[in-house]
Every structure is written in structure tokens, then in C-alpha cells.
Image (cartoon, rainbow, N blue to C red):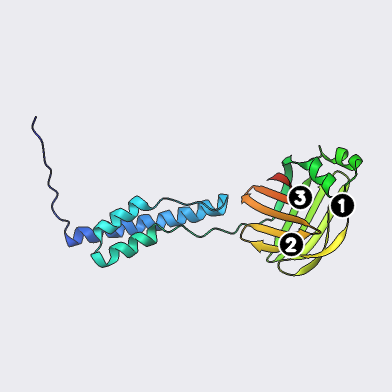
Amino acid sequence: MRSHIYYFPPLSQSYRTLVWSLCTVVISVCVYLQWWICSEVGWSRLNWRHLGLIIAALEPEGIKTCGYQLLTLPLRPVTMSFSGKYQLESQENFEAFMKAIGLPDELIQKGKDIKSVSEIEENGDDFKVTVTTGPKVLVNTFTIGKEADLETITGEKMKAVVKRDGNKLKVSLKGIESVTEMVDANTICNTMTVGGIVYKRISKRV
């Protein structure tokens, strides 16, 4: 069987410059697409490895390592806005959690099947959160990092500080640790923990 060996001559300087220019355009388009994807669905990471290897092979030795490392770095997470109206889609451990915080059984049974609606208004660090559960409307306003008077599920009012960590809002209210996260542009996940019991709610934009 005859074997064939193909020889590719070294790239000329002009050809290398042309290919590098084309790669630069490709990188610009990919960065824009990555930014657009992140703004729509939250943080994600594109795999730049193959493109990085191509450019590294074309560039002078002094740029190879630096260029490749830059291309394979993950992009920074995109902070999304919480603003919008969301309806409860699913929940876990509702009854156990409500009992743990002292809600009467009668109210628990009435509320377990109600699809609450949360409306969030975000203006910089200022927030207004309105939660409507049947006839009950709970409204809280606060500024990130500043103490505010907040009303709990049981109707109690207390002072607390809401902190922001990327796409998460965190607050501690009378032993209840609450984390509200923007999972993607249309989904909010609220997790509340007390005494080892974790109550999880998933709400979708309406």
C-alpha cells in the first residue's frame, strides 16, 4: 500500500497577517455573542481552546502563551436585573417550613395550593418587592447594604440588612436565612432555611 506524505510550506508573513486579522474579527464576534448570551440567560462559558491554539500557532513565540491564556479565561458573570413580575411554579417543603416558623395549620392548608405572584422593582440599589398570595399582600422596600424594616411571612416586622452577591439577594430574618437568586432571565429561585428545614420556591416571569 502506497503512503502519501503531504508537505505544507511555511506561511508567509503577509499570509500570517491576513489570517491573524481574520482571527481578530472572529474573536470580536464571539465576544459579542458571549455578551449577548449572558445578558439573556445568565453566565455561561464558551470554549475558546481550539481558536486559542490556532492563533498561538500563527503568532510569534513571545505572544503565544499570553494570547492562549487570555482566550481560555472564563468571562465574568453578568449581573441581571430582578425587575419584573413572577408567578410561583413549584415549591418544596412548604408545610414543614411553615410549621417550623409557627404558622397555624389552618393558614398552611389554605396557602399551600395558592400560586403567589411576586413583583420586583429594582432601581439601582433600591428595591420594592410586592408578594401577593391570595388576598394577602406583602410589601417590602429596602436599599442594598442598608438597614430596613422588613415584614416576614408571619406578619412580624423587624430590622435587617439585605446584601447582594452577583445575582443573589441575601438576608437573615429572625433565624431564617433567605437567598433569592436570578437563575436566568425568566426564573427566580428563593431558598429559605430555618432549623435545618429548607423551603425552596421556583417562580417564572409572567
Percent position of residue 160, x then y:
78, 65
Tell me the SS state at disc 2.
Answer: strand
Are there few (<14), some (14-19), or many (20+) residues within 10 Å of tag 2?
some
The mark that comes first in sequence, 1 or 3, is 3
| Spatial separation of the CA atoms under disc 1 and disc 3 | 17 Å
Q: Amino acid at mark 3?
A: Ser
Vertical comparison of 63 with 116: above or below: below
In which quadrant of the rendered view does residue 90 lie? top right
Position of 117 with respect to 62 (left or right) is right
Residue, disc 2: 127
| Spatial separation of the CA atoms under disc 3 and disc 2 | 13 Å
Tell me the SS state at disc 1.
Answer: loop
Percent position of residue 43, x then y:
54, 53
Residue, disc 1: 154
The mark that comes first in sequence, 3 or 2, is 3
**Residue occupying the point 39% across, 53% down:** 48
The N terminus lies in quadrant: top left
Considering depth in this image, is 156 or 16 the residue closer to the camera? 156
Callout 3 touching callout 2 (CB < 8 Å): no
Camera-near label (1 vs 3) is 1
Tell me the SS state at disc 3.
Answer: strand
Extreme-left residue of the structure:
2
| Spatial separation of the CA atoms under disc 2 and disc 1 | 21 Å
Q: Amino acid at mark 1?
A: Thr
Residue, disc 3: 118
**Residue occupying the point 71% across, 50% down:** 190
Asked if residue 206 shows in the view, the reply is: no
Extreme-top residue of the structure:
1
Asked if residue 107 shows in the view, the reply is: yes
Q: Amino acid at mark 2?
A: Phe
